[in-house]
Image (spheres, rainbow, N blue to C red):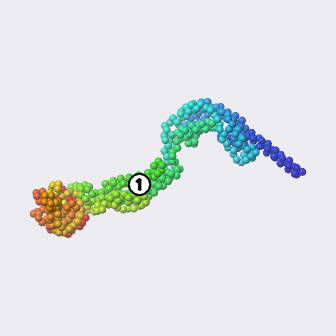
Amino acid sequence: MPLIAAGVFVGVLAAGYIGVSVYFTSHFYMNTEINGHDFSMKTAADVKEYIEQQVQGYSLTILEKDNKTDSISGEEISLKYNENKDIENVLKRQNAFLWPQAFFVKNSSKATVDVSYDRDALEDKISRLQAVKAEQIPPTSAYPKFNGTEYVVEPEVTGTEVNQELLREKIHQYISEFQPELDMVGENCYALPKYTSESGDVTAACNEMNQYLKASITYSMDQPVVVDKTLISEWVTADAEMKVTFNEGAVREWLREFGKQYDTVGKTRSITSPWGKTVEVSGGTYGWSVDEEAEFPALVNSIKNGEVVTREPIYVAGQTAASRGPQDWGSTYLEVDLSGQHMWYIVNGSTALETDVVTGVPTPAKETPSGVYSILEMEPNSTLVGEIDPSTGQPEYRTVVRYWMRVTWSGIGFHDADWQPAFGGSLYASGLGSHGCINMPVDQAGALYSMLSVGTPVIIHY
């Protein structure tokens, strides 16, 4: 009896299972969605009826930016449902005998719903949407922005430009599925920027750019000149593809301006002589001169290596001065007043020696050049040799002097001149002028020679 009862029970269960399976040959499973709508336990005819009902009075509301909305009604575009076999095909793909799985797994399917509508009318409605008619402002990608301390990601701006191809596609899809609302922002129907604040490329660009900002190079000038993140940030850029570039050309241009500001060779300076006479003097070879070609790679490497350092810039060999500031010759120098035919040797701000002199004949070929120079060499018992006279083929002069103190490599210098009958006054302009040198009394030249050293600045002026 128990076996008979069990057999009857199993038979009943089997019959029930088969019966339910037969049911699901014409009905959709529980938990069945088609095109986003619940059609659990419905037949294909039920689905088609539902779709036909949706056509009646259908309207698609389009949600736009700034809380603006538009709508497209089915009536305005002559919307009509065209029956096809796709819904039956969805049902056929459903295995009726596996219906218990529907209790545990949602069955979501897509069916092609054929609708027809007046395409010209729909196109007209789309063209009249507020979002389409509005000014089309393109989106702006997220990008690295310097905030005064470092580069950070500046968020993207979506703008108002509509991706009209995608918008048309979505409108067709939503109408086909009889969806009530289309959120243009949610469906990305506005043109999207290439990079957003979540884009790894933007973050990577920020990180790379911030590596350069670690550097800080301080030049020890009158006042410290600092090349740090504030300045370096102007030389580091990221293009539209987030490729980081360090503008070495901008560094070279900055160095050029730096040199213009701090180079003093040939610049106009003023000097007040012990007589109280203040004049401006320009030209010459003495002063500061930054070696921009040598300093350029040094500065670039310091920046790329993130160095924090205080140092002097690299100067042209021999082109440094005694001090900073407008009178870079410092407090020890030689001064020659060509108008007064007088010279001074100033040591630590005090006059150590002064004397009348005879300078070059005031003609272009022989005048003593004004400017700021320095003592290039010193030589006792030197023979001074003039230029070759074309008419004789011999030097214009060959003169032995006891004390030679060179100012220019072209042959200008201080020396004794025992052939001069006197010094000072207007002798230089009345036939006794030199070929450009500063003639001194023998005793004064000797005294100067004993005190002077190579490199001492020389200021010559009228």
Residue identified by numbered label 1: 232
Image quarter for residue 107? Answer: top right
Image position, residue 175 (x, y; %) = 61, 36
Image position, residue 431 (x, y; %) = 10, 58
Residue beneath the point at 38% across and 58% down: 297
Which amino acid lies under the numbered mark 1 shown in the image of this protein? Ile
Closer to us: 132 or 385: 385
Closer to us: 114 or 27: 114
Crowding at dot 1, Cα within 10 Å, few <14 / some 14-19 / many 20+, comes out as many
Q: Would residue 429 be seen by someone viewing this image from the given angle?
A: yes
Residue beneath the point at 65% across and 33% down: 81
Answer left or right for 362 relative to 39. left
Residue beneath the point at 17% across and 63% down: 385
Q: Would residue 50 be seen by someone viewing this image from the given angle?
A: no
Residue 126 to residue 220: above or below: above
Residue beneath the point at 43% across and 60% down: 305
Answer left or right for 362 relative to 59. left
| Image quarter hosting the C terminus | bottom left
